[in-house]
Structure formats: C-alpha cells, structure tokens
Amino acid sequence: MRIYVAKDGDTLSRIAEQFNITIESLLSLNAQIGSPGQLLSGEPIYLPTHTMSREYRTASPFGNLQCPVPWFPTMPPEEMEKNEYDVIIVGTGAGGGAVLWRLCEQWGANGKRIGVVEAGDLTAPTHAANLPYFNADLYTYTGQSHPQFPGTRQVIAFGGRTLLWGLISPRVPDFALAEWPVPVNEMKAYYNIAEKLMSVTQNFQNNSSLQEMLLGRLQNHGFLEAQYAPIAADLTPTKYGVVHSNVFFSSIQCFASGIYRRPFDLAVRSRAVQVYLENGRAAGVRVMQPDGKSYVIRSKTIVLSAGALENPRILLNSGIEGRAIGHYLTGHTYVRARGKIETKDFPDMLGTLDILIPQTQDRPFQIQIDGPYGPDWFVMYQQYKERPFRDDWEITLYGFGKTQSRYENRVAIDPLRRDQYGIPLIQIDFSYSDQDLEIRRQAANTLQQAAAAIGVPIVAQEGEPAIQVVPPGGDQHESGTCRMGHDPDTSTTNPYGQVHGVPGLYAADLSVLPTLNAANPTLSVVALAIRTADYIVSQNGS
C-alpha cells in the first residue's frame, strides 16, 4: 500500500483518474472519506501498491478508453448507449463469461448484437496462478461491512472472482441434483460441456508421490471415496504451433474464445444500477461510471451476472417485484486447519497435492486437502524467491458444509445508506441454522480424522485455534438470492434463469443456485449459465 498526499483541488475522483484506479478501490482503502467529490488538500490518501499515473498510461488501440494494459477491446458506455442490443450481460465472472461464450458459439457471425458491462476495470489477463509475479494488489477488492456476513468480499474487475478462485471443480452428486428444478440427465449433459470449456481434469496430480501416498493412507483408513480433485487446468501439450501457457481457467478465456467467433461490445468501469422495463419486459439497463455520469443501454434481453449480492440490489432498485428476490441467501459452513508433513519419507520431487473427499448422502460436507505445489503455488512464490529445501511442508485441510436455504437469510436494500453513485447499499440478514452448525461440527471432526490418517498433526498458528471456523461469507460462495424454481413465492427465476413474470430478464451466476450443497459451485454455475444461454437462443432465434 502507498500513501499519496492530496494536492489543492484533489478529490478521490480526480485521484482515481490520475492513477487509473477504480473509485471503489479508493473508497474501500479510505473509508474515512465520505464522498468521491470531497476536497482533500493535504490529506494522506491510501493507494494500492500497483498504480500507474496517467502520464505513463498506454493508449488503448481499441478506442478512447485508456488503461495500463490494453489487452482487450473495450467501448465507452456513451458509445454503447447509441446502439440497441439483442443481449446485454451484466458482469464478467463465471456466469457472465459462460453466457457470452455460449451465445457467441451458438450465434456465430449472425446479425445479433451482444454487449457486456463490467463495474471493474481491466486488471490482469488471466487467472492469478498463471502469473509468476502475482500480487493481490493487482486486483480490486471491495470489502463489505455486514456484521452477520463479515467474511464476504467482492472482486470488482474484469473476470471477477475467477481471477483468484481455487480451481476445484466437482459436480454436485446426483442425489443432491434431484432437489433441483433441472432434470438430472440434462444437468449432466451441461456438466460435460462446462468441463470441456474449463478443461477440468483429474490428471493434474499425476506422478505425484505426495498425492499417491497420502491418498493411499486415506483409503486405508476408511476414506474410500477420497479421490484426485478435479482441477480446471488445461494440460494440453504444445503442438501444431499452439502454446498452452494459460493453464488455469478464468472467465477471461470465455471472452477471448467468444470474440474469436464474433464481435461484441464491452464497457468497463460501468456499474449496472437499474433495469428498465417496457410493457412488462426487459428493455434496457442503466450504468454509471466513477465520474457520476449515467447511461442507458437498450437491449431486448438482459442477463444479470453480478453475483448473489449485487443481482438482488439491481432488481430491488429497479422496483421489480418478487417475494423471493434477495431471500434464501446461503453460504457454506467452512472450517480449515494446517499441519506439517515431514519430507524424509518422500522422494525429492514431492509433486502437487489436491485430494477431494466428496459429499455423500450420509456425509453432507466435503473435505479438501492441498499442499505445497497445488493451485496455490503462487502464494509460496510470494514467500520465497527460490524454492528452498525443507524438512517439512505445510498441508492445508478444508471442510465445506451444506447449508439450509432459509427465507429469513436475505439481501435487502438499505433505506438510509447510499453508495458513491447515490444507489442504496445492501444490508444482509444471515445466520446458520442448528442443522448447519451440526454439519460444521461433523466436518471439523472428520477433518481431524483425515489429518490423522495422512500423518499430518494439526497445529495452531499465530494464536489461532488448531481448527479455524471461518466466519459467514468467508467461503466466497454466497448464493441463492435469485434461486431457480417453479414457484414465484419461493424462487426468483424459473428453471432457465428467467425472472418470474419479466420476459427477457435473466440471472446467471451463483445467485440462481436453488440449494448450496457441499461441492464447490463454480462448475455448476458455468453449466447452468450455458443452459440459460441456450434457452435465450431458443427464445430469440438463430
């Protein structure tokens, strides 16, 4: 973090422009400042570590928008306002990227017009694990101040959370899918498409002595379901002149693949705040930029992929009615522990470690185990310039528990507080049920048993308990606030993601999950988003 002393006439808005930082990032680092337009002469202002003043910015070859790394074509929202689109996608995370990719694939080079709006900016062109220079300050986090959901945070950037997600990509088991309003066989078909798109593989840990030995220990101690964790990693070797350097999946790959098939328009630093309807159906979306300017972009179809916290805020701020909008907020119960394993029993080349003990009907939680060279290897490289020889390595165990979908857990708009755009902020009401807490207790006990089975004593670190209970929201898997279903009283969208009673308005991200089982949800989000895109194509012609 850096400190900049404001000059005469400086405001947060001017500083954001000067250093090419999003206003959201500045506000989150400088909570003592009430307004982006407040005069700040002489005030110390906190800046992210990596910033670039406008004197050193590179002009983008794709238009008037300037950014430090001009690696993707963008269009200012004032230009998009002049057009009428067939589809506007709000948000560029897993759901928005999958919808865009599928529409581009299905529509090809026809005359349909697609637009995308993203609240964040271009930050990095790939998943963090593909970058040896990774530093979290490259990304824009917006912290939330919600006492009942204190662990949550948002990544406001092109690519969203897929820039940083953990890459574990299991399917929801069939017995749990049976509770969803989507036929199980149909869901399996879309899982197949999603796994191909994301390059999901169970071969990432092949030939790892650490993986094989610890997996064997687990199975010998009764964890018969323990398996190689499915990882979203492209292991295709270089051939035919194609170099596969972008190994770990992010939604940016969807946008790159999509634009290869057909053009679309992308506006960054453009936060969607309101949906407009005409004669009861979707007609457009209003977006705002950090300078306070507002634009209305017309479209026949709108897909909200802004996340389980932002989607209901947009819907409620638009006056769209629905008993379930914002309700049924869910998030995993989450525990984790760390221990160390001695290296004397293993060859010099340990290899990577990513083991999954999946949810079963009798065990409504899953356990993950990863180690020194797993997808989190970039964290190690922040700590060591060279990989040192050590007598032991740290192993991390995680437990994710299924939670109940309850009406009283909700996202609502705050009647008193507004953000820098003048839009109502959200307030969150959330608590775990007794059943949720019992499942968390079971997960913690099983995590201890798994640690004992693999010979990794769990140790407390830095004054924290040996098994840490992560606060609500800390799993970053919040979902359910626009859940799918047949009944408008208990769901916001129909089984294809269309908002009940509003033709042309859809949601496609974590918010639509009807239940949150123990499995990591990104693969399911991508599969459902592809299915929603296919439905949109069927409703709008080819």
Image (cartoon, helix red, strand yellow):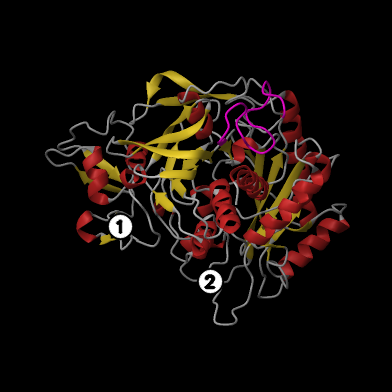
| Residue furthest bottom in the image | 240
Badges 1 and 2: C-beta atoms under 8 Å apart?
A: no
Residue found at x 54% / y 82%: 241
If you read the primary sequence from the N terminus, does the residue marked by circle 1 or circle 2 appear first? 1
Q: Work out whether 489 lies above or below 369.
A: above
Per the image, the residue denoted by label 2 is 245
Which of the 4 image quarters holds residue 224? bottom right
Q: What's the residue type where badge 2 is placed?
A: Ser
**x and y, in percent, of residue 457 in the image:** 71, 52
Kind of residue at badge 1:
Gly
Q: Mark 1 points at which residue?
A: 63
Residue 328 drawn in magenta: no
Q: Give the range drawn in magenta.
A: 486-505
- The rendered magenta stretch, by its main secondary structure, is classed as loop
**Apparent side of residue 117 relative to residue 350 in the rendered image (left or right):** left
Indicate the secondary structure of the residue bearing disc 2: loop
From this view, report whether residue 187 is shown above or below residue 390: above
